[in-house]
Image (cartoon, helix red, strand yellow):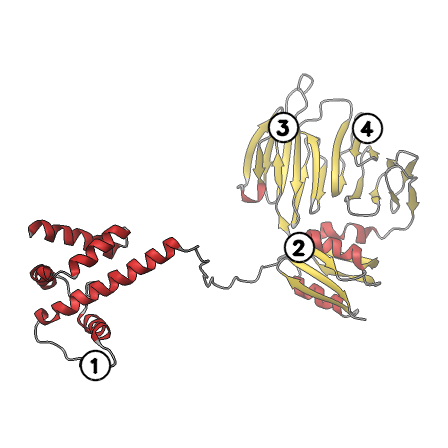
Amino acid sequence: MENNNSRFEYLLARFREGSASLDELDELLKMVENPALTDELRSMWEHMPADAHHFDNATSRKILSSVLQDESQPAIPMIQPKSKRFLIPAIAASIALFIAATWAFVHYTSSKPSMPIVVNEPKQQPVQIVPGNNKAILQLSGGRTILLDSTADGSLIKEGDARISKKDGQIVYQQSGNTAMEEDRYNTLITPKGGQYQLVLSDGTKVWMNAASSLKYPSSFTGSTREVELTGEAYFEVAKNPGKPFHVQLNGMEIEVLGTHFNVNAYDNEETINTTLLEGAVKVNGGLNDVQLKPGQQASGQPGKPLRVLNNVDVDGVVAWKNGYFQFDQAGLDVLMRQIERWYDVTVKFEGKVPNRLFGGKISRNSNINDVLRILELTKVGFRIEGKTIIVTDKS
């Protein structure tokens, strides 16, 4: 009997842990139905904690009642017994019922195709749409990348003859020594949607980069010219060096300067590439023609097509993004929404055709997106937000 008792305890433990196999469940069920195990059951019950799983008095009596009751017999009264030994039949019935139910469930699910389990997941919080801030990725010449928004201020790394440091949303290159024998080491600063950053090149040129932009440049300017490559939008304050002209390479265009302040908007999804001069002089080569700009003028065009010069441009509006504002003067809704898309890191979709509206005004780029959209709704344009997508409709 001792071997049977050890086997029973083992099988019961396996059952309560939920790890019993089908054969073990079947074996345990037969052992519980065996009257010869009554003494073993009584001994286990006497030493079992009162709060043991599945075997409290009330549960045992209720299960026994439901097992024994039928239409021809009255229900067994729920009377508290004076001794645990009166509960032995209930214990056996309880174990038998649970084992039988478990066996039936396992047998059924193992022989039938599995059914999907429906889980009531907690409701997701609405996606937060927030204004952009200082964040960018610095890609070094060897391919290593540095996430600047999560990197502490201070000296970062040495690239060739230049020491790179970070301070207050700005990357600074400080060139030292003789660069005559130094090979070009190109770095790239990338701002994502919802990001902006400032950069001081090794020659002292200052660059402000708008969202969704990139600038490729050498860590040290070693040749007879200073060349950088831009996608997106940036504002330049070029350090003067008559003996080493500064060139900005665009998509099929080139800007040449000696020392000047200018803004370049060269996003792929804009209709034209626009170079706006604030101070000094620049020459823009569009492939088919060159134009020389004076302060307040703008060169506008597409690669492979003639450039045209616009006079008396609202330069404050052009560089408003650098100063923390959206500013428009009779701009179309599609132009405005592309700026919102880049700065708030959202996707903009139009239901139907783009509403024919022109907008003018100025608003902080730190504004809540709902405040911006409420202002635009005054012109009978409708908006709804689904996740990080803004859907635009015409309500006129």
Dot 4, crowdedness within 10 Å: few (<14), some or many (≥20)? few
Give residue 363's position: percent from left, percent from top: 73, 61
Labels 1 & 2 near each other (Cβ < 8 A): no
Q: Quadrant of residue 300?
A: top right
Measured in 3D between alpha carbons, the distance from the residue under mark 2 to the one under mark 3, in whole angstroms, is 30 Å
From the image, tell me which residue sits under label 3: 141
Measured in 3D between alpha carbons, the distance from the residue under mark 3 to the one under mark 4, in whole angstroms, is 28 Å
Q: Quadrant of residue 33?
A: bottom left
Labels 2 & 4 near each other (Cβ < 8 A): no
Measured in 3D between alpha carbons, the distance from the residue under mark 2 to the one under mark 4, in whole angstroms, is 40 Å
What's the amino acid at mark 3? Answer: Ser
From the image, tell me which residue sits under label 4: 242
Q: Disc 1 or 2, which lies upstream in sequence?
A: 1
Q: Disc 1 or 4, which lies upstream in sequence?
A: 1
Numbered tag placed on residue 223 in the rendering: none
Q: Would you place residue 78 above or below residue 101 in this image? A: below
What's the amino acid at mark 1? Answer: Ala
Q: Nearer the viewer, mark 1 or mark 4?
A: 1
Query: On the rendered structure, is 366 left or right of 248?
Result: left
